[in-house]
Image: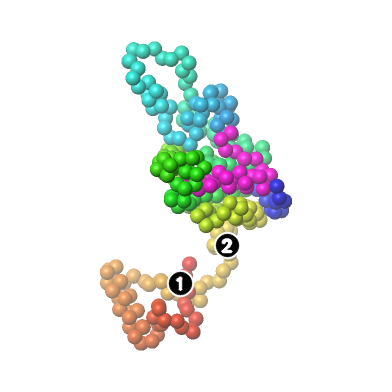
Amino acid sequence: MSTPEPGVSAMRAVTISREYGSGGGEIAARLAERLGWRLIDHEVVQQIAQRLGVEEEDAAAHDEHAESWVMQFLTTMQGVGPMAALPSNLSFPPTEASYTRALRDVVNGAVLAGQTVIVGRGSQIILRDRRDTLHVRIVAPLDLRITYVALRENLTRSAAQQRIIQRDQERRRYLSATYRALPEDPHLYDIILNTSVLDLDGCVDLIRHSLNDKATRLAIPATALGPSGWSLPPYPTVPVDFIPPTGTSEDTAEGVAEGAAENVAEGSVAPASAPTDTPQSHSGA
């Protein structure tokens, strides 16, 4: 464990959302080790089971899955006669609502108990209103994820691809059904890292830097955050890509094309392919 940046002590959590096979779980584990923080991953299932007083398998059936227990029950009863007695060892697991409430309690409780790195479980939604939490998304191209999963789980490429698609779909359905959100929505995260280029330690370093940077901005009012808080002066001229609409969109497009051609012919605007020594106009925000 290395010494964290001074500002990190003001932060409470890092949430890690990941595409399956992108290495997000490994990044989370390495990050927690570097920071000296607690890692919350599969153990959250055990905590929820204890809170609800059910078997761990029952709670695990809800973990990042949207399929209702009723559908699972009907699946297990296939082939059994309509008058058959229920199995004596059958226990009725928690409802989706009770599971979601317990999951929120566990995630919030973990953050209150100490600084935490949380993998998945909708934590980017549960903790979205906490400014002392950094939200991270880990992604990678499908072909690279297939190679990774095939290697780590000793699968054929075909089986690895099937597993990736299944797990990504389950996580997407879970977040959509439970929180009306999609995991790929970039606005849920502070940073998104692509592991097709960045290595494990590089990702951890970037997250730690972002964690410290966000910590230094906790005292700034929320209304003063964002690009408008950068105190940049107004553009000196109208951005070149701002063209007031005149007439139909088709007429406007033709007019722009004709105007651009005339400007190039007259020498007032350099062709895009030709270098120029004069300063170029900015393209706006």
Q: Secondary structure at mark 2?
A: helix
Of residues 272 and 181, the one nearer the viewer is 272
Query: Which amino acid type is shown beneath numbered disc 1?
Result: Ser
Which color scheme did the rendering employ for the protein?
Answer: rainbow
Does the magenta segment cover residue 196? no
Query: Which amino acid type is shown beneath numbered disc 2?
Result: Gly
136, above or below 91, in the image: below
* Residues at discs 2 and 1 in contact (Cβ within 8 Å): no
Which residue is label 2 attached to? 229
Mark 2–mark 1 Cα distance, whole angstroms, equals 20 Å
Q: Position of residue 190 (x, y in %)?
A: 55, 53
Is residue 177 rendered to the left or right of residue 33?
Answer: left
Disc number placed over residue 109 in the picture, else none: none
Q: What residue lies at 41% left-to-right and 40% top-to-bottom?
A: 159
Question: Quadrant of the rendered structure where residue 244 is?
Answer: bottom left
Of residues 172 and 80, the one nearer the viewer is 80
Q: What residue lies at 40% left-to-right and 85% top-to-bottom?
A: 268
Range of magenta residues: 14-43
Q: What residue lies at 54% left-to-right and 26% top-to-bottom?
A: 56
Which residue is label 1 attached to? 283
